Image (spheres, rainbow, N blue to C red):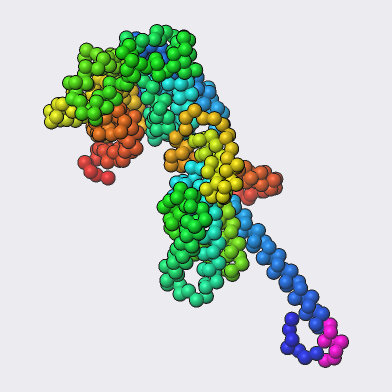
Amino acid sequence: MAFWIASSPHNHNQTKTPNLMRLVIYATLPGILAQWYFFGWGNLIHIGIAMITALVCEFTVLSLRKKPIAHELLDGSALLTALLLGICLPALAPWWISVIGTIFAIVIVKQLYGGLGHNPFNPAMAGYVMLLVSFPLQMTLWQPPLSLVAVDLNFTNTLTTILTGFTVEGYSVEQVRNTLDGITMATPLDTLKTNINQGLTVLESLNNPVFGDNFALGWEWINAGFLLGGLFLIFKKAIAWQTPVSFLISLFICSFIGYSMSPDSSASTMFHWFSGATMLGAFFILTDPVTGATSTKGRIIVGLLAGLLVYLIRTAGGYPDGIAFAILLCNMSAPLIDQYTRPRTYGHLKGDK
Amino acid sequence: MSNDIAPQNSKAADIADDLDEQEKAAEKSQAAAALKAEYKELALQGLWKNNPGLVQLLGLCPLLAVTSTVTNALGLGLATLLVLVCSNVTVSAIRHWVPKEIRIPIFVLIIAAFVTCVQLLMNAYAYGIYQSLGIFLPLIVTNCAIIGRAEAYASKNPVKQSAFDGLMMGLGFAIILIILGVVREILGQGTLFDGADLLLGDWASVLRIEVMQLDSQFLLAILPPGAFIAMGFLIALKNTIDSQIKAKKVADTDLVIERVRVNFDS
């Protein structure tokens, strides 16, 4: 009897890019569902606009670059980028925000650097940061949770608001954003930051209805949804657990130190975990296989760095949430971190070249 | 040419003189042709092949910083052009007396003197643009495109050619500045020649064109990152045109079939 002798590896990983992308898209569903439940149709409409734009852009650039169009167009990476960007956008932002953001993300951040696998920055986050820097007014059109909105924001109303800036009844975006009490709403992170700058304590600001009963009305459930999706991804081994865990622990430690030093002027640890884009960033964006670190140690370091940066930007920076900026900074440092955390090759001594 | 041999008679001398003149004329026309070719090459180098903005990538700091409007770009382009021509002329005029060891400080001093002149002139006659250019006007001193031309061309060539070289390089730089300014101003504010009266006098306020009505400024185009991106696109466009020209040339000449003998010795 003859044995067939082959060299390692003997166990091949059969996962293909489209399968992985599809899995990640499925995993965002709980979070998107929560977003839809608490904030209405806005983000779903933006996701749709962004996806159509992404496909058109991808098709144009691929045909200009003479690449296999069907193969790369259908690998789902452009759709995932559009999806993540659409989730991040303010629900009532005008339609051209998502169009410009997606064009920037796909054409400049992804394709001009060489397409999937060659982009140094996460396209969705780079697109988001570009929008945030370029259109500060539109990018702060955050919509309060549906339960606090006076206008009935059904699908048609949201659609016309995004397309024209007015609801069917003729309310402008600014009027929609006013609550029953006539106060313009911001996100919980933004409200807290403004209040602390005005000299209010955290306890006083928590009376604001945007905070709800727990940490942040609506946002806590969205974050819980993304946490659930992220755990599913870790369970399916689609992402490495080191990055999100070290990121969350780092953010926890930083906010814990801040909170124990001055509880009146810093938010609680759980508020940092369950508001803003924490969970989305931790499980879906920081774990991007292209732009993140690849070694185990490197992933842990990137996570720790991102947590620290997010905390610093949230408390001391000019923007209320810092996930996107922190992730771009981490993307920049990931190659260097990888360089210094190369794992030992089997059979070589530690530090042996 | 040669007057060593004494003419034997007047007729022979006449013929010799005629020959002499003919030779001289031929030489002159040859020299003129060479000069013309050199001027043409200089223009081509400055405007396209060796453009300071697109190819040498020199002087990027002012290029990216002040091109948020066409007016600023034009102001800085003109200032740089003037300094470049003057410094090239001066460096070339004194090139025989400058010791090689200390030429760089001398070039820098010459450039700094001209920049000071331009700055004072702008301060006097175009105060608005002087203010909006701010620190980037005195910073022309450090523009490597200028000292680069002084070192690479003007210090080795006669005054006329150096002046022409400075003019072409300056024009190439100014054109890139203006193109960037046009792109960024249209994208960022939707206007063209906004504030041209600051540079060109009161009549120029009619130049202002509203290209499109923007509800909100596209800040990325006005901020420095937008300049980097637009610059990248410009360079890519130039390289595409170059490679297309090259591909055309190759297609024209590459019709000869060559036979290669394969031998196993080499």
Q: Residue at 49% across / 57% down in the picture?
A: B124
Q: Is residue A340 above or below residue B94?
A: above
Q: Extreme right residue here?
A: B11
Q: Residue at 47% across / 32% down in the picture?
A: B217
Q: Is residue B37 visible?
A: yes
User: In screen coordinates, is B37 left or right of A309?
Assistant: right
Q: At which x and y percent is residue A57?
A: 52, 26
Give, as a single range, the part of the protein colored magenta: B8-15
Q: Is residue A307 above or below residue B184?
A: above
Q: At which x and y percent is residue B120?
A: 47, 60
Please count the marks in the image.
0
Quarter of the rendering containing residue A286: top left
- Main SS of the magenta segment? helix
Q: At which x and y percent is residue A128?
A: 40, 28
Q: Is residue B245 above or below residue A200?
A: below
Question: Along the line of sight, which residue is nearer the eye, B28 or A153?
Answer: A153
User: In screen coordinates, is B33 left or right of A204?
Assistant: right
User: In screen coordinates, is A331 left or right of B56?
Assistant: left
Is residue A302 on the magenta stretch?
no
Quarter of the rendering containing residue A25: top left
Q: Residue at 54% across / 57% down in the picture?
A: B81
Quarter of the rendering containing residue A224: top left
Image quarter (top left, top right, bottom left or bottom right) of the C terminus of chain A: top left
